[in-house]
């Protein structure tokens, strides 16, 4: 879908923001870019839709150089979500969502159908929200509208630059859950920039860790947690100390509702299982039963463990990862 080949960005003052970056983003992938301040993550994102011109190398979308696209065609076919969502205050929610479809001269009936479809998808009842103004919405609701506005013209690619960092923690977690649910339905290619490792581990199919304009490692959340490429990644992710013998209280992590039926001969994990053993088991199968004193007390899945690990590394991530 997106290919970076030896891409660099040097500003007129000589600052090299991005240095010889090679990245492949696959179709339908949720690809997260993370790194400390000045790592080049936002610059890398903005080069994709030519908001920032590259200096060296090549970026291709669907095997076509971005420089070969008409700039309007390129941007109309890429959804873009910012930290400050910037809805037009004088326009209704419906009018805000319709901007790109209108520019592309969609039929009005098709546009209205798309607006209602997206509002419904985002959990915003069309009859309630269609004619409201942005000032009548909460911060979280405005952010949802910003996301679905980026989806309005049905682009294959969505760029998201720190989209949830301006909202409170509870709203942020809900928005993260919403975007995961949405991605399950729409299967878009998403490139998502964040400074929050917990967010990266929760959302990313793969994560690109950057430092000083260079890529330090690209891998799945498990790759970064189990096989960090170097000490910087290990420290940034929050796994500086070995996981092999680290104890974790599974009783605090499991789903306490009735455990789901486990197919086959899956053996339950003891509540005293070490963190490394939990990761090994979950790398083979998700949603495993947990037992204590011979009784099944719940189930555990990858998201719960990744969230636990991310919380452990949150202070490190905040220390190293101020926003670009």
Image: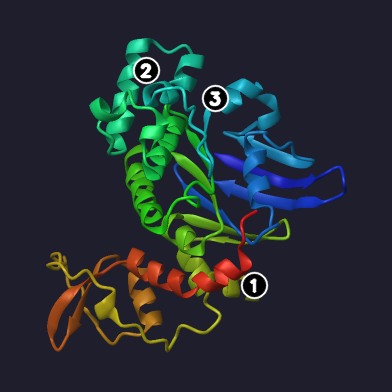
Image position, residue 13 (x, y; %)? 87, 46
Q: Are marks 1 and 2 in contact (CB under 8 Å)?
A: no
Split into 4 quadrants, where in the image is the N terminus? top right
Q: Residue at x 42, y 13 (%)?
A: 106
Q: Pick out the residue farthest to the front.
A: 135
**Which mark sits nearer the N-terminus, 3 or 2?**
3
Q: Residues within 10 Å of mark 2 (few under 14, many from 20)?
A: many
Residue 168 lies, in percent from the top left, at 42, 55
Residue ID at (33%, 74%): 281
**Crowding near the residue tagged with mark 1, few <14, some 14–19, many ≥20 C-alpha atoms within 10 Å:** some
Question: What is the CA distance from the residue labelled 3 to the residue labelled 2?
Answer: 15 Å
Of 271 and 57, which appears nearest the observer?
271
Residue positioned 62% across, 61% down in the render:
322
Disc 2 secondary structure class: helix
Give the CA distance from mark 1 to mark 3.
38 Å
Q: Which residue is mark 3?
A: 76
Q: Residue 111's mark? A: 2
Q: Residues within 10 Å of mark 3 (few under 14, many from 20)?
A: some
Q: What secondary structure is found at the residue carrying circle 1?
A: helix
Left or right relative to 136: residue 197:
right
Q: Report the disc number at residue 232.
A: 1
User: Which mark's residue is nearer the viewer, 1 or 2?
Assistant: 2
Mark nearer the N terminus (1 vs 3): 3
In this rendering, the answer to whether 147 lies above or below 206 is above
Please state which of residues 142 and 41 is positioned toward the viewer in this rendering: 142
**Earlier along the polypeptide chain: callout 1 or callout 2?**
2
Residue 270 in view in this figure = yes
Query: Residue 128, image x and y in percent?
Result: 25, 29
């Amino acid at each position: 879908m997106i290919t970076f080949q030896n891409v660099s960005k040097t500003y007129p003052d000589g600052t090299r923001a991005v240095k010889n970056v090679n990245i492949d983003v696959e179709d339908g992938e949720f690809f997260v870019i993370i790194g400390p301040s000045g790592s080049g993550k936002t610059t890398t994102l903005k080069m994709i839709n030519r908001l920032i011109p590259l200096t060296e190398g090549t970026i291709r979308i669907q095997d076509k150089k971005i420089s070969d696209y008409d700039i309007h065609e390129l941007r109309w076919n890429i959804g873009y979500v910012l930290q400050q969502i910037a809805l037009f205050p004088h326009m209704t929610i419906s009018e805000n969502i319709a901007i790109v479809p209108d520019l592309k001269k969609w039929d009005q009936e098709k546009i209205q159908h798309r607006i209602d479809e997206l509002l419904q998808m985002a959990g915003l009842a069309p009859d309630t929200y269609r004619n409201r103004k942005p000032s009548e919405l909460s911060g979280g609701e405005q952010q949802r509208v910003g996301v679905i506005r980026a989806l309005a013209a049905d682009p294959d690619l969505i760029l998201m630059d720190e989209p949830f960092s301006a909202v409170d923690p509870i709203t942020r977690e809900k928005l993260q859950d919403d975007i995961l649910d949405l991605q399950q339905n729409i299967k878009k290619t998403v490139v998502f920039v964040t400074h929050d490792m917990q967010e990266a581990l929760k959302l990313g199919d793969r994560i690109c860790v950057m430092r000083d304009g260079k890529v330090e490692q690209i891998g799945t959340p498990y790759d970064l947690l189990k096989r960090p490429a170097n000490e910087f990644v290990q420290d940034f992710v929050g796994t500086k100390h070995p996981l092999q013998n680290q104890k974790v209280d599974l009783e605090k992590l499991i789903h306490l509702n009735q455990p789901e039926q486990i197919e086959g001969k899956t053996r339950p994990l003891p509540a005293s299982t070490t963190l490394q053993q939990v990761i090994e088991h979950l790398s083979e199968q998700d949603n495993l039963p947990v037992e204590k004193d011979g009784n099944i007390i719940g189930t555990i899945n990858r998201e719960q463990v990744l969230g636990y690990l991310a919380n452990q590394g949150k202070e490190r991530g905040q220390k190293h990862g101020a926003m670009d």
